[in-house]
Amino acid sequence: MRSLLDEGDINLPSIDTFYDGVREFYSTAFEYCTKWLLLNNTLLKNGVFVDFKKRNQCSMDNVEEVLSALEHIHSDLINDPRAMDILEEEFLAYQAMAETDIPEHIWKESVFTEKTNVDGCETLTYHRMDMI
């Protein structure tokens, strides 16, 4: 924009109009995100334990919140104290598990790479927890 201004292709009011448009775009995008994104979604807030590296930052309360959000699927589990005790034991074993406890071939097989832009230059790599 500086070079266009220096060359006389645009003037200061045009630059002001451009920046007003940019500000309006970001304000509208923010409003849209806060209106439609599920920022207070129970699953998103409590499902952090699925990330193996963050498993120790969570508690059984997080698991119970996720189950409550999926009560229509897991109502039998939630209402069975013995099943919940077994689930808690499994969760504690999961938290106590070290990365070295998982065989190397499982780590390699569970890698998932996702392209994050159109030209494929940027990628996101993570481990599929359903396989681990």
Image (cartoon, grey):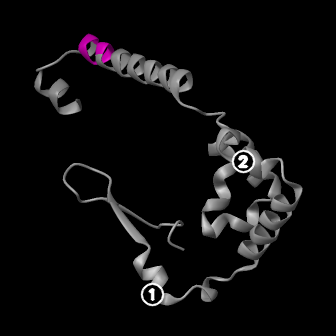
Which corner quadrant of the image does residue 56 belong to?
bottom right
Q: Amino acid at mark 1?
A: His
Which of the pair 23/56 is nearer the observer? 56
Tell me if label 2 and label 1 are in contact, CB under 8 Å: no
Give the quarter of the figure containing the C terminus: bottom right
Residue 18 in magenta? Answer: no
Q: Earlier in the sequence, mark 2 or mark 1?
A: 2
Identify the residue shown where x is 11% and y is 20%: 9
Q: CA distance from mark 2 to mark 1?
A: 31 Å
Label 2 crowding class (10 Å Cα cut-off): few <14, some 14-19, many 20+?
many
Left or right: residue 66 versus residue 7 is right
Query: Helix, strand or loop at disc 1?
Result: helix
Q: What residue does disc 1 label?
A: 105
* Residue 97, image x, y percentages: 70, 80
Residue at disc 2, secondary structure:
helix
Q: Nearer the viewer, residue 93 or 114?
A: 93
- Badge 2 amino acid: Leu
Please rate how many residues cluster around mark 1, counting C-alpha atoms within 10 Å: few if below 14, some from 14 to 19, many from 20: few
Q: Nearer the viewer, residue 103 or 81?
A: 81
Q: Position of residue 113 (x, y in %)?
A: 35, 65
Q: What label sits on residue 67 in the rendered view?
A: 2
Q: Which residue is found at the position 61% from the left and 34% from the top?
A: 39
On screen, residue 110 above or below 99: above
- Up/down of 119 relative to 38, above or below: below
Q: Residue furthest right?
A: 81
Q: In the image, which residues are magenta? A: 13-17
User: Camera-side residue: 7 or 18?
Assistant: 18
